[in-house]
Image (spheres, rainbow, N blue to C red):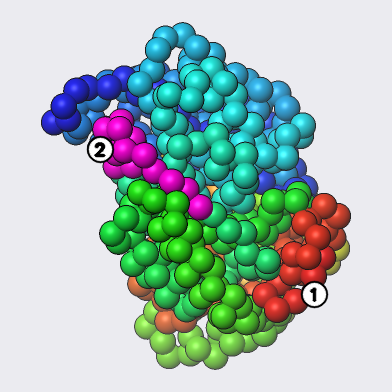
Amino acid sequence: MPNSSRTILIAGFQHETNTFAPSKATYESFERGEGFPLMCRGADVLALREVNIPAGGFIRAAQASGHTLVPVIWAGASPSAHVTRDAFERIAGEVVEAASTRDFDAVYLDLHGAMVAEHVDDGEGELLARVREIVGRDVPIVASLDLHANVTERMLRNADALVAYRTYPHVDMADTGARAAALLERLLAGETLHGASRRLPFLIPINGMCTLLEPSRGMYESVSAAEAGAVVSASFAPGFPAADFAECGPVIWAYAHSAEEAEAAVDALYSRMLAEESAWCVPFLSPDEAVREAMRLSNGASRPVVIADTQDNPGAGGDANTMEMLRALVRNGANGAAFGLIYDPAAAAAAHRAGVGARLELSLGGQSNVPGDAPFAGVFEVVSLSDGRCRYDGPMMNGMQAELGPVACLRFDDVLIAVSSRKAQMLDRNLYRVAGIQPEEMRILVNKSSVHFRADFEPIAKAVLVAKAPGPMVADPADLPWTRLARGMRTRPGGEAF
C-alpha cells in the first residue's frame, strides 16, 4: 500500500485517424465501439479492469495501490477518417467538465495518440491542453498511447509522462497501462522526471512495424534495454502514416532523473533507427500472387495459410467491404478458403430473412469508392447465421465482448465469407467462429487486417502473406497524396522527401 491514497481521475478516448479514409467517426461510432468496448461511464469503466486495454492495466495497478479512482468515460471507435466535431466535443467535454468538479491528485488518460478531428489536427494534444488548463501544473497528468501514435509537441508539453505500447500486435495494452501507473506513482512521490524526444525523418509502412519480425523486434528490445539507471521510461511510436498533418510520423522519447540521461537514451535509439532505415521497407504481393502462393503452400498442409488484406483493414481506416481478394480467390479456383469480416449490413439482413440453406442473388460489398473495387455480384448460399455476439479469447482485447449485429456465413464456389452488420478487424479467431467457420479447418484464410491478426492466427498458420488489393488504407505511405506533411519527411524508408 502507498504512504497515502490519492484521488485519480481516469478516462479513455481512443481513435486512430486515417485522413484519407472514406468515412468519419461519429458519436454513434463511439457508442457502438466498433471492435472496442462499448462506450461506458462512471463505475462501468471500472469493469474494464479485466479487459486487455491500457485502462484495464491502470485500474488494476492503481486499485492495488489503494488509490481512489474517479472514472468518467471510456470511448473508442474503429479507425476511420476524421472524428466529427460533435463527437470530439461531446466526449472531450465530459472529461474536461469532470476535471473541474473537484480537486484531483492526478489524472490518467487512456489515449491512442493519432486522433484527428474535423476541427483539430491533434485531438490528444487538444484534450491534454484543456485538462491541463483546468487542473494546473501541480497535478500530474499521465497518459498511455498506442504504438501507432503520432506524438506531438503539444502532447509531450501538456502531459507529465506518456508511455506507449511495445508490441504490434498489441498484446501489451494492459501492461502499458500498468507502466503508466508506475510512472504516476513516481510523480506522486515527488520525483522530478526530465523528458527528451526526437522525431525521425521517414514514415514507416504499418506492416513493417510488426514486433514479431525484424527490425521492429530488435528496436523494441533496445527501447526496453534503455530503461536503466537514471532512465525510468523510454518509448518509441512508429506513428500512424496516414494522417495528413505536419506532425505525422515516428517519435522516440524518454524520461530520466536528469535531462542529459534522457537525451542520451533518445539519441542512441534515434541513431539505431537511422542506421537501419532501409530495413523498415516492406514487400507486398498482388491479390493473384498472394492467392496462388497460398494455394501452393496449403497443398498438403495441415494448417491454413493466412493472407492479410491489408489495404482494407478496418483497424486502419478501411470499411472492410472491398472485394478484390474474393475475386482473386474465385478466379484462381481456391478451395477451402474463408474471407472475413465483410461489413455489409444489407447482405447480412438479407441472409437472415432468407434463412440457412437459401440461395440469394446479392451484390456483396464494394462500397469503398476506391478505384479497382466494385460489388461482387452473384448467387450465394446461406450456410450459417448468428446474432453476432462473441467474446475475444485471443491475446488482443482478451475478455472483451463483441457485438457484431446479425452475422451470416455465405458460400460462393468453395469460399466461405463471414459477413457482419458492424465493422470489426479480423484479429480474433472467434470472429470466424461466430459466423460458423472453424478457421483451423480451412486451407486459406483472407483476413481484413494488417498485423493484429498475427497474435491469434500465427500460432495456427502454415504461413502469412501480405496482399496489396485496392482499398482505402494505402499500405505504402509513399502512395498517398500528401499535402500537409512536414517538409523534408521521407514518405517511405529511404524514399523521397516531401
Q: Quadrant of residue 199?
A: bottom right
Q: Which residue is mark 2?
A: 61
Name which residue type carries label 2.
Answer: Ala
Q: CA distance from mark 2 to mark 1?
A: 45 Å
Foreground mark, 2 or 1?
1
Question: Can residue 65 be seen in this snapshot?
Answer: yes
Q: Which residue is mark 1?
A: 496
Q: Position of residue 99 (x, y in %)?
A: 48, 17
Q: Position of residue 457 (x, y in %)?
A: 42, 67
Magenta range is 182-196
At a point 50% along the width and 12% down the height, the residue shown is: 100
Choose between 404 and 383: the one closer to the eye.
Answer: 404
Choose between 413 and 434: the one closer to the eye.
Answer: 434
Q: Quadrant of residue 46?
A: top left
Q: Residue furthest top?
A: 101
Sequence-first tag of 2 and 1 = 2
At a point 59% along the width and 24% down the height, the residue shown is: 130
Q: Residues within 10 Å of mark 1 (few under 14, many from 20)?
A: few
Asked if 439 appears above or below 351 in the picture, the reply is below
Count of numbered tags: 2
Judged from the image, the secondary structure of the residue bearing numbered disc 1 is: loop
At a point 25% along the width and 37% down the height, the residue shown is: 61
Name which residue type carries label 1.
Answer: Glu
